[in-house]
Image (spheres, grey):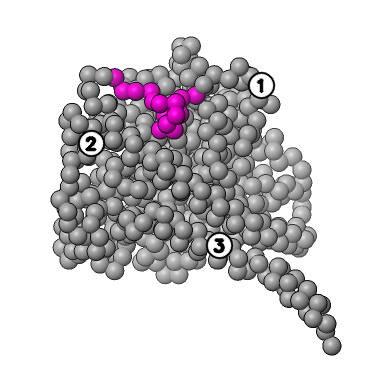
């Protein structure tokens, strides 16, 4: 007969060992409920029962679905995560002359010879791989592996010179802090981001030149924020996440990996693999827009001006496919990405990602460079958010390690991932709740639009755009640190969370001379039953 104390101990042990199977899912569900409670029932999510996937792009590309930040609670949260300088980030600029100049500048930086850009991406990938993965088998987190690659690549793209080691550390530290905040795995640390801002501002103030002219409509501090937000935040983070998804998918589908590695010149098949990766694991989760006028489509009820539209990429990418949850690059042999429910870089009619041509090109270069050296293997979970940063084994191709000898490390990797998921999910609940509440308290986007017009000007239109208030993280002005040596790797060490396209119409922005939004008529939305 089992004693009560023994039975209790066995029950407690069983419960503890079973936590990876149920606790993370429960905590994620709780986190979503907390976020929804804090943010309120604000948005209309598409596709839905009244406007399905067949109307998704029509609605997304509608001329009146062109507001992004002003008037949405979600904007405060995204600005909070992307601080400092979120209001001069291209993703959040209002439509108008300033946006036009910044967008032209970004496209100019991203332009170049395909052969040259491919070669530079391959060279930076090779340099990082040769430094990091030196053993027969190396355990890495793929997102961490890729960040130095894109830090070096985009530094060279911006400044037209190699990236020094201490600057690479600044860029990686900044990008890691932003994406960890977005994933709610760690709280944000503005001081860590300030180090990169100070470095960029020092270089610009000293007359350091970039490969292309910077937007003249921005102040020097805003130019530093522009470079930091557009290239050393969004570009580095998104490419690192994209490569982590792609390489992890290859690691978990050995037949696909063998075909890509065995036929490195087969651009068509590798493009299919990339398309399927973006379909299955879209970089954008939900993109939100604010309607600047009524939207009347044939069939669905009219959507009134001032409504917040939430476009779900994962839901849209799951419509119209056989076995949508299966990773199957072969489906693209008979399906055109242009005609499918597939918009990895947004829609052309509503400010698509400016790197939509560049990203697949340099991803192919980095993938081939990696597979020419290593066989990839991983037994971890693979979700769109990859909060674990994609743990993976890199096995040298010349090591001769057969698959049967990988069982032990694969098992250890699987076990570690499941138990890490328990602690990580609890941390995400705590950090996420705290950051959502803090964003609601500080209201960075709402405060900005209460005191600036669509071009970043205060109510006095003759006054120049401001560099910000040191107590306001919309422009968290970096202060010089007497102990901050830009050439000291130790000083630049870690100190410690989509790019979706935006377009906010100036037609319904602030009223001239007031800096406040014009009152909107009170009407009830037929989709939500609420007043926008």
Pointer 2 residue: 516
Q: Which x, y percent locates residue 4?
A: 79, 81
Residue drawn at x 34%, y 36% is 447
Residue at screen point 15% across, 63% down = 298
Which is nearer the N-term, disc 3 or disc 1? Answer: 3
Q: 234 and 195: which one is in front?
A: 195
Residue visible at 41% across and 58% down in the picture: 36
Mark 3 neighbour class, 10 Å CA radius: few under 14, some 14 to 19, many 20 or more: some
Residue 27 — which label? 3
Q: Are marks 2 and 1 in contact (CB under 8 Å)?
A: no
| Local crowd size for mark 1, using a 10 Å CA cut-off: few (<14), some (14–19), many (≥20) | few
- Left or right of 226? Residue 148 is right
Examine the rendering and report whether any part of residue 245 can be seen: no
Relative to residue 330, is residue 397 drawn left or right? right
Q: Position of residue 531 (x, y in %)?
A: 23, 57
What segment is highlighted magenta in the picture? 464-478
> Relative to 422, is 506 on the left or the right?
left
Residue linked to disc 1: 488
Is 469 inside the magenta-drawn segment?
yes
**Dividing the image into 4 quarters, which one contains the C terminus?**
bottom left
């Amino acid at each position: 007969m089992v004693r009560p104390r023994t039975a209790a101990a066995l029950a407690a042990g069983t419960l503890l060992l079973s936590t990876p199977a149920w606790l993370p899912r429960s905590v994620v569900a709780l986190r979503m409920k907390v976020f929804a409670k804090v943010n309120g029932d604000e948005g209309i999510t598409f596709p839905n029962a009244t406007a399905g996937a067949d109307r998704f792009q029509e609605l997304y590309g509608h001329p009146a679905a062109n507001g992004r930040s002003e008037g949405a609670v979600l904007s405060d949260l995204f600005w909070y995560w992307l601080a400092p300088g979120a209001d001069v980030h291209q993703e959040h600029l209002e439509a108008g002359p300033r946006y036009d100049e910044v967008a032209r500048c970004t496209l100019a930086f991203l332009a170049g010879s395909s052969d040259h850009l491919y070669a530079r991406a391959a060279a930076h990938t090779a340099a990082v791989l040769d430094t990091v993965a030196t053993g027969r088998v190396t355990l890495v987190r793929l997102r961490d592996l890729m960040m130095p690659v894109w830090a070096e690549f985009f530094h060279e793209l911006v400044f037209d010179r190699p990236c020094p080691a201490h600057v690479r550390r600044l860029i990686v530290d900044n990008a890691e802090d932003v994406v960890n905040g977005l994933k709610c795995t760690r709280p944000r640390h503005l001081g860590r981001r300030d180090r990169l801002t100070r470095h960029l501002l020092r270089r610009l103030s000293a007359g350091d030149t970039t490969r292309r002219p910077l937007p003249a409509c921005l102040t020097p501090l805003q130019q530093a924020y522009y470079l930091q937000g557009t290239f050393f935040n969004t570009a580095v983070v998104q490419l690192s996440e994209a490569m982590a998804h792609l390489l992890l998918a290859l690691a978990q589908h050995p037949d696909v990996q063998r075909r890509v590695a065995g036929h490195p010149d087969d651009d068509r098949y590798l493009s299919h693999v990339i398309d399927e990766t973006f379909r299955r694991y879209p970089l954008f989760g939900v993109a939100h827009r604010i309607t600047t006028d009524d939207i009347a489509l044939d069939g669905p009820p009219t959507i009134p001006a001032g409504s917040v539209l939430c476009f779900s990429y994962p839901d849209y990418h799951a419509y119209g496919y056989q076995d949508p949850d299966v990773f199957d690059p072969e489906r693209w042999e008979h399906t055109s990405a242009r005609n499918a429910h597939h918009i990895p870089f947004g829609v052309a009619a509503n400010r698509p990602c400016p790197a939509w041509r560049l990203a697949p090109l340099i991803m192919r270069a980095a993938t081939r460079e990696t597979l020419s050296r290593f066989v990839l293997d991983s037994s971890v979970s693979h979700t769109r958010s990859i909060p674990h940063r994609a743990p993976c084994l890199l096995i040298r191709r010349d090591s001769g390690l057969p698959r049967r000898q990988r069982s032990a490390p694969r098992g250890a990797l699987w076990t570690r991932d499941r138990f890490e998921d328990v602690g990580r999910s609890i941390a995400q609940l705590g950090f996420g709740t705290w950051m959502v509440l803090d964003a609601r308290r500080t209201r960075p986007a709402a405060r900005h639009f209460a005191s600036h017009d669509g071009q970043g000007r205060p109510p006095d239109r003759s006054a120049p755009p401001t560099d910000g208030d040191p107590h306001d993280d919309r422009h968290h002005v970096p202060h010089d640190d007497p102990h901050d040596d830009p050439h000291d790797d130790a000083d630049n060490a870690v100190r410690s969370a989509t790019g979706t396209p935006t377009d906010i119409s100036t037609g319904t922005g602030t009223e001239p001379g007031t800096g406040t939004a014009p009152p909107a008529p009170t009407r009830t939305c037929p989709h939500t039953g609420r007043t926008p």
